Amino acid sequence: MKAIAITRAATAGSNIPFLSAIELPVPVAAGHDLLIEVKAISVNPVDTKVRAGFTGDTPRVLGWDAVGVVKSVGEAVTLFAPGDEVWYAGALGRAGSNSEFQLVDERIVALKPRSLDNASAAALPLTAITAWELLFDRLGVQEGGNAGDVLLIVGAAGGVGSILTQLARKLTRMTIIGTASRPESQKWVLDAGAHHVIDHSKPLSEELARIGVNAVTHVASLNSTEQHYAQLIAALAPQGKLALIDDPETLDARPLKAKSISLHWEFMFTRSMFETPDMLAQHQLLTRVAALIDDKTIKTTLGEHYGPINASNLQRAHTQLETGRAVGKIVLEGF
């Protein structure tokens, strides 16, 4: 089968080819695994992070977002059958979706939304899982609840922010404030459902005052947490909640004490990495998100379609993602 793999360490802006087309044997499904023929993929920061840390001699297939068709199933599979159209993010420790065929555990897979084409659906799985777990599992927000609470989403125009804004607006009673610094990204955030958008390149206290908000109860810090950390603590109300998904070099928890602010980390690969007893929750939440898509409650976050899945297009996608200026998700489709 065709696959695109990382073959050397390189930064995205170096113009050195770091992805190559290779041939691999088609894997065989066993146990809870599905063998899926990949139809479309999207690119996430985890791809660039894994690529940046690559040090081995063995090519590694990246990719943690896909839509495809089930070709065969392992003997323990009960949720799917050959021919099913599915979507998923996959597991960090296994070969990724930048290949014609991929093995994925059925417990982290769901049927794709019927109303979306493959490219539009491929934009969503990883970010939808991250956003759902952050909002409901980590921050403890209640569906239909939290009236009077205020959620500040830092980096609301990105992949996770785009779907988190929609979920929070449609499924809770919170006031949603998204941050974005450019006119096009600010419009994107408002279109996703934020009540307000503020500029994170300016002092957050001044921006919040501009929209008449004295304090927020919940923060989802999706990027640049170190840069904004002190401002986020200042913006949070006593007994507020701060959740993050990025990788700050240092994070001193002591400033959180005076306000009794709780700190929450979201990593959507935790369940698959440790095969937790509630691993099936990702199948269930992806099923729920598909239903929300099909009933028009939420929409795809596809930003740009980069064409077929090949080494040059994927390298271009990595480079664009690392500029920090991508709005929505970058998707590729077909080999």
Image (cartoon, grey):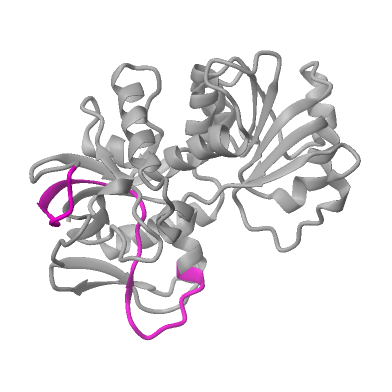
Residue visible at 42% across and 50% down in the picture: 277
Q: Nearer the viewer, residue 108 or 178?
A: 108
Magenta includes 329?
Answer: no
From the viewer's perspective, is residue 9 above or below residue 309?
below
From the viewer's perspective, is residue 297 above or below residue 12?
above
From the viewer's perspective, is residue 36 above or below residue 132?
below
> What is the x, y in percent for residue 278?
42, 45
User: Is 265 situated left or right of 209 in this image?
Assistant: left
> What is the x, y in percent for residue 232?
78, 39
Q: Nearer the viewer, residue 85 or 328?
A: 85
Outermost residue toward the right?
A: 258
User: Is 26 situated left or right of 8 in this image?
Assistant: left
Q: Nearer the viewer, residue 281 or 113?
A: 281
Look at the image and give the residue range highlighted in magenta.
Answer: 51-78
> What is the x, y in percent for residue 321?
48, 52
Q: Quadrant of the N terminus?
A: bottom left
Residue visible at 35% across and 78% down in the picture: 7
